[in-house]
Image: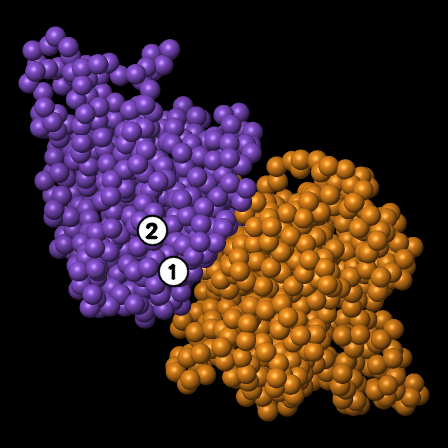
Chain colours: A purple, B orange
Amino acid sequence: MTLADLRWPLERAARVHGESVAVTCAGRSVTYAELAERVARLGAALAGFGVEPGERVAFLGVNSLAHLECWLGVPAAGRVLVDLNTRLAVDELAFMVDDCAPRVLIHDAANAETAARLLDRCGSLHELVPDGDPYEQLIADAGPAALAPALGADTLATISYTGGTTGSPKGVMLSHGNLAANALHNLIITGHRADDAFLHVNPMFHVAGISNVFAATWVGARQVVLPRFDPATVTDTIERERVTLATFVPTMLAMWLTYLGEHPGADVSSLRNLHYAASPISPVLQRRVCETLAGCEIAQMYGMTEAAPTVTQLSPDTHRRGLAGEEPDASRLSSMGAPVPGVRAEVRRPDGSSLAPGEIGEVWVNGPNVMLGYWNRPEATAAALTADGWYRTGDAAYADAGGYLFMVDRLKDMIITGGENVYSIEVENALISLDGVAEAAVFGVPDPQWGERVHAVVVLADSDDEAAQIDEVALRDHCRARIAGFKVPRSFELRTEPLPKSGAGKVLKNPLREPHWRESARRVS
Amino acid sequence: MTLADLRWPLERAARVHGESVAVTCAGRSVTYAELAERVARLGAALAGFGVEPGERVAFLGVNSLAHLECWLGVPAAGRVLVDLNTRLAVDELAFMVDDCAPRVLIHDAANAETAARLLDRCGSLHELVPDGDPYEQLIADAGPAALAPALGADTLATISYTGGTTGSPKGVMLSHGNLAANALHNLIITGHRADDAFLHVNPMFHVAGISNVFAATWVGARQVVLPRFDPATVTDTIERERVTLATFVPTMLAMWLTYLGEHPGADVSSLRNLHYAASPISPVLQRRVCETLAGCEIAQMYGMTEAAPTVTQLSPDTHRRGLAGEEPDASRLSSMGAPVPGVRAEVRRPDGSSLAPGEIGEVWVNGPNVMLGYWNRPEATAAALTADGWYRTGDAAYADAGGYLFMVDRLKDMIITGGENVYSIEVENALISLDGVAEAAVFGVPDPQWGERVHAVVVLADSDDEAAQIDEVALRDHCRARIAGFKVPRSFELRTEPLPKSGAGKVLKNPLREPHWRESARRVS
């Protein structure tokens, strides 16, 4: 069976929509014919660096034309893209670079210093390619692109690092078939067309930020790229570019709606479909976005890197009927939606048997979008993927009678804050490395701006002189030197009594979490 | 890589849309939960007949609930559906039954006599299951459905017979993955949603007639099934059921628009998307349908059984802009459209190399929708499928600069009349078997009702007493006894001068065809 590889979307767009604008970014526009030419030259340039098929190419930077081209071009050339999160600390990035050994790092100006430090520290990294003139020169100088060999659907396309319960990030291996399947699924649930304009504002170093690159390319839609989220720029861009489709994380949505409220003259009526994704949304915000953008379809997506990423959708129709008070849709507004066509998601027991509606278990996911496994981590791969291809997400949920999934907890103890995943153990490890800290428990608590914020309960050593010195500022400073800024707790509880524990000595976070979530009408995480 | 099998659409619909109406047919409606239960029982009943996984089950009948259930149920049970064309002669059907040896034949009342004759003639056929009470009894009596084993995407789902240049029909083997991929592609280009109602009026024994069964099921849309096309019934059904989506062949469209013109009170405003497919459309009819159904999106599909079937689409936007006179869309109205996302189609030389825009070659197709091959026909399979998975369609076409395909001829010498494929050699063989006929050349000519009609140039034997007896009536009667009614020529030219031939003695049909097509503004076949 021949399956789509990631070259098909751009191949089609260059042929059918060659003269249409493909990408608009920072005042520059390129057509699909030009984009295909540039992407082919990027492949030739990588070969010129001596990067062999299957070898890794890293990228470090905000959204840009080069960033988008690396997603279209590196896998298309049979190489593997490793897109690094610019928000991580150098130590964290160095771990990833050492783990998967990219030969080349393409980076932007804002990350030049980090890039240089990585080159210094990581033996496998041989070349830095700054975006801007050097990157452009590279594209211009590349010879005619060599015809790439046939790529199978199982060919590795990207390694995307996610945090892990052990504290070491894991490299999620996604194939051409995984990302192509996800693009088809996204096309079905969003309905991109050639005359649409998609706004890419989510960071492309997350798979959620690029899954719509392949979908939009496949139908020849125009893609508007912003380097980062900013309410005024987003508003101006939607107005100027007549943007029709976008995906936001709830944190952005909240900030943006506040901005729109303060700027009633803003015209964002071109928007016809907006998805929010990547973290829980409050009922107030959910209603507010539907009311503010009354002419626009609003939908929610749930997924994860290992699923490339889309798993479920809470559809525009469910939002509309639910907010009008119609059941069962009103109750489903607090769910993550139902599995999209092409993906299966079920709530199961640890032995894989199915649970009845309402029973809490783990979300298992199956489909052509499910990852190949974790890079160099056979045990973690075996733990996550069953023999028949189901991915165990680690998310605890129940389903209603209609298969709508309601998240109740994350088995992996993960916090999603402003669309970023934070594994509590990483933060706990940072906290307890400070002298005077006896114990630490980190979890997410509801936050109007971030969906969840990282919260820490810190137990100070009883009879310790160091402990007397510790306050919130000291804890923050200590964390900041060790982990990415978005992982540093935004709020603390300092205490001397020990953390509650199970009979086996495992910390019980639920009694700690519970007071924070009691006020929240709907516990989603 | 896990790929969708054909159980996924109904599995999802039963879970997410279990209480919604799945099928309405002949005054009866079943929900998706009921449909899933019935389909599971059908699988158990087949096992009860002793039909092993991989063995064939034949169906002979018009569209019905049972017919739709066989498509969802026979492949889901790991058996192979052989859906027979009710328009064929018994000899033709017997060839197919002998070729693939189904154990069971499910048929409707109208085809009971044919079914009995097949049972009598074909040793492999052991059981007849008349639709109606016996079929319903079967479903009711079936025990709890056994859990079917895991099905791979390459598992054979159906054998669909098409005519062939040799005169023997070939069994196109389509896998679960083929039909599932086509369903995803159709969902993208049509945009079915849960609140849509799809009208199935094309015969389900053609793959084009069932590809929307899987698409509509996957999203939980309502499916309205009519046994056959009739303008009054279609109109009443669209009004009563508030049908939103449909696919017609141009012949139906022409008859239907005439009916609507005569019944100005008919309300078909619920239609939001209508595809036409399966045969060339006249520019007059194309404009007429867009003007008559002004609030409805109109699109064209092109495909073939071997591609399960969708290959290209001429989009609603192209119709709209083209009819408004905008280029390049106006020129593209006579094309078959561009490859849909997920499918590749290129115009190539016999050696597989690509041709420049405007150069005429053969249409090659590649994608997860391309058939496994022809049943028991390794040579025909090898001739049709390349080593890297491209299907050589036998259609001659050129592409414009944007990849839009313009059909110029069928290399296989096939006529499409009213949505049915007729291979000229079959008809020619029938004609020359009549004493007094020296030569015959059969081809399609433009016809306002049928798109193309079967036309025969018959050379009578010069000095033959039999020849003096031959007239159109004699030729028609002779054909009718040997081939299906839709294959019998609708018009004749009788002559005594020999057919034009190439140096190698091959009949040259182009000089014969040319006068018939000269009047046609756009030669599409």
Q: Nearer the viewer, mark 2 or mark 1?
A: 2
Image quarter hosting the C terminus of chain A:
top left
Is B283 placed above or below A16 here?
below
Residue B456 place in picture, x, y as percent = 75, 82
The residue carrying pointer 2 sits among few (fewer than 14), some (14 to 19) or many (20 or more) residues within 10 Å by Cα, namely many
In which chain is the residue bearing label 2?
A
Whether labels 2 and 1 share one chain: yes
Per the image, label 1 sits on a secondary structure element best described as strand
Residue B376 place in picture, x, y as percent = 72, 50
| Quadrant position of residue B117 | bottom right
Image position of B62 (left or right of A57): right
Residue A447 place in picture, x, y as percent = 24, 40
- State the residue position of label 2: A286
| Quadrant position of residue A499 | top left
Is B303 placed above or below B508 here?
above
- State the residue position of label 1: A297
Image position of A225 (left or right of B237): left
Q: Residue at coordinates 63% horizontally, 51% vertically from top-left? A: B32
Q: Nearer the viewer, residue B169 or A424?
A: A424
- Tag 2 and tag 1, C-beta contact below 8 Å: no
| Quadrant position of residue B53 | top right
Q: Residue at coordinates 43% horizontally, 60% vertically from top-left? A: A191
Q: Nearer the viewer, residue B390 or A167?
A: A167
Identified by mark 2, the residue type is Gln
Identified by mark 1, the residue type is Glu
Is A341 placed above or below A474 here?
below
Q: Residue at coordinates 73% horizontally, 43% vertically from top-left? A: B41
Q: Residue at coordinates 78% horizontally, 90% vertically from top-left? A: B495
Per the image, label 2 sits on a secondary structure element best described as helix
Residue A495 place in picture, x, y as percent = 18, 19
Looking at marks 2 and 1 on the same chain, the residue that comes earlier in the sequence is marked by 2
